[in-house]
Amino acid sequence: MMTSTMFFSGFVVCLLVSSFTIGVIILVKKIFNLHLTAKGHYNLWFLLLLSLTFPFIPIQLLPVTDLMSFWDSRSPLESQTVPSAEHSLVQTNWIQDITVSVDRYDLALLNNIFFFIWISGMFVIAVFTLMAWFKIRRIKKHTHSLTNKELLLLFECCKQKLKISRPIIAGESSLVKTPMTFGLFKTYVVLPLHFDQWLSEKDIEYIFLHELNHYKYKDFSINYLMVIFQILYWFNPLVWLAFRRMRLDREIACDAAILNSLDERSYEEYGNTIIQFVHKASRARTLDLANHLNGSKKQIKTRIEKIAYFKSETKLLRWKSAAIFIFAGIFVAGQAPFIPVMAQEDNSYRFKHDNVIYEDLGDYFAGFDGSFVLYDKEAGQYYIHNKDQSTLRVSPNSTYKIYSALLGLETGTITDENSAVKWNGLKYPIDSWNADQDLTSAMRNSVTWYFQNLDRQVQPDTIQAFLDRIGYGNHDMSGGIKEYWLESSLKISPVEQVLLLQAFYTNQFGFKEENIQTVKDAIKLEGKDGSILSGKTGTGTVNGKNINGWFIGYVESEQNTYFFATNIQNKDQSYGSKAVEITLSILKQKGIY
């Protein structure tokens, strides 16, 4: 997901997912504060760690419902109609490029800028993390293992009390001022130098229990995971605040675990042990890779208050805490099905069909990113070149005029007998546009103003309902009534173009048959050897650059009908006429036309 070409949408998804989850966790903690154990408060933050992975999970691994795509569970309906070879071919010299340029902001540049900023921020945070790692290595080198047999025996007793059998190094160092635990594979519990001279044996026992509890619950492994997410989500201050609170809740949970094993008379002693480190320097911000006994004075105050009012946790409280965690987990996990929609902005179609042959036709597409999709109606077989590009949604441009014409006929805006629209008098750069038009001439000359006029008469709500009814691409009209299909918000993939052509051809939508036939007549192109070629080209021109070329249509014969869609893209040579050239070459090679 996080590539430079679509980074901005990924950035927004990460921001929304992380912020939403943090909000949910804080709300649950607030509402159910008295019904959660100390460990329960801490465990809720693991839901945040889970949700932070969602935007980085491959789309196909997420539990996305098939309803996200209108056609996923549908099989193309077969028509029993056999086309006649006797057609009136109304278009001559139809292989031409008729397009006008639209002005658009360079979103690729914006994506690249955001991507660079994100990478730069990650690099800076990673440098600080590396510095923390080197600091821990330095502490390791200056750590001397404990030699006091009584303290070593006490340490082993504490390990046994917590049922820890693996070897752990207990030591002291002049580089630390507060007890800390670190190390993924070789664990160290490090105390300040000469700590036994100013701490009582009971204080030391509490410290050992505290640090060993961190080891028992693998808290330093969680530290590394949190740091990774802080690097990835450095741009969201809520993530930083949430992790700060998570670390505090972890210390409170650790305190509670120890208090649950002590009698009430020992609570005050344990609290006093922590207070002894208040005057010590607060931990360095670079030491998030380690667990430590103290923190900021504000955090110490919160922990002491929790200790002062601590009550042993009942079994009922633990059950309620578990139930709340499950409830919150289901709620947070509910985001997963919606992430592909947000992440890809409907930029990809999820195509499922049993009979698909993927073939390499790259020689025909030299110099282009492109795809060719063919459907053999008789065999029920798809042939697809470039699987990824075949499901990538891009602007339909003039290929949409097939459906614009159908909508105009269905709403009565035009009829087969009366489809004339007067020229508005504006001078267009294409001579054939500067005249009155009917549906046939407007389709032949790809007169954009004619179909824009139909849209204005039909009205947006009706158009939106039509797009939803036929499942046209991403259904998105947000680009405005004038340009939504011209390198704007409305997008469709080559696979969807073929699916729609089948549905149009066999009238799966249940429109008036005479209107379907009128549009079919308008898009007839030529015929040879008993076969009829129908279709529509489209060229997307942005800021004077031809970036998106289309040719969609079908070939009819007495024996079969073949539906096809070709899309090509590059920086400035992607014409509809080039898409026609590629398509005809492939159809000829396959013996279809």
Image (spheres, rainbow, N blue to C red):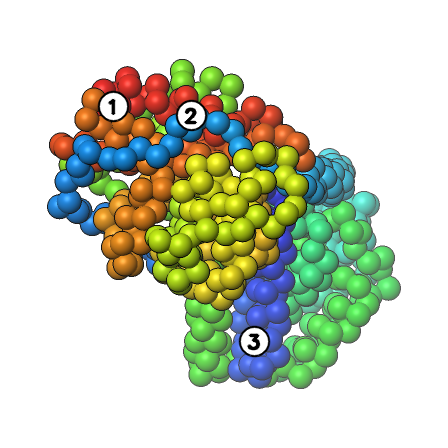
x and y percentages locating residue 330 in the rendered image: 44, 68
| Label drawn at residue 538 | none
Amino acid found under the numbered disc labelled 3? Val
Disc nearest the viewer among 1 and 3: 1
* Left or right of residue 514: residue 1: right
Q: Secondary structure at mark 2?
A: loop
Which residue sits at x=46%, y=55%? 475
* Left or right of residue 528: residue 111: right
How crowded is the residue under tag 1: few (<14 C-alpha within 10 Å), some, or many (20+)?
A: few
* Dot 2 and dot 1 residues touching (CB under 8 Å): no
Residue 493 visible within the image: no
Query: Label 1, label 3: how many angstroms apart (C-alpha)?
Result: 70 Å
How crowded is the residue under tag 3: few (<14 C-alpha within 10 Å), some, or many (20+)?
A: some
Amino acid found under the numbered disc labelled 2? Asn
Q: Where 204 falls versus 140 (above or below)?
A: below
Viewer-proximal residue among 526 and 538: 526
Viewer-proximal residue among 537 and 209: 537
* Left or right of residue 363: residue 20: right
In primary-sequence order, the first of circles 1 and 3 is: 3
Which residue sits at x=60%, y=26%? 572
Return the residue at label 2: 93
| Label drawn at residue 528 | 1
Return the residue at label 3: 28
Query: Label 2, label 1: how many angstroms apart (C-alpha)?
Result: 15 Å
Q: Secondary structure at mark 3?
A: helix
Tell me the quarter of the picture where residue 358 sits: top left
In primary-sequence order, the first of circles 2 and 3 is: 3
Query: Label 2, label 3: how many angstroms apart (C-alpha)?
Result: 68 Å
Which residue sits at x=58%, y=34%? 431
Q: Where 365 falls versus 559 (above or below)?
A: above
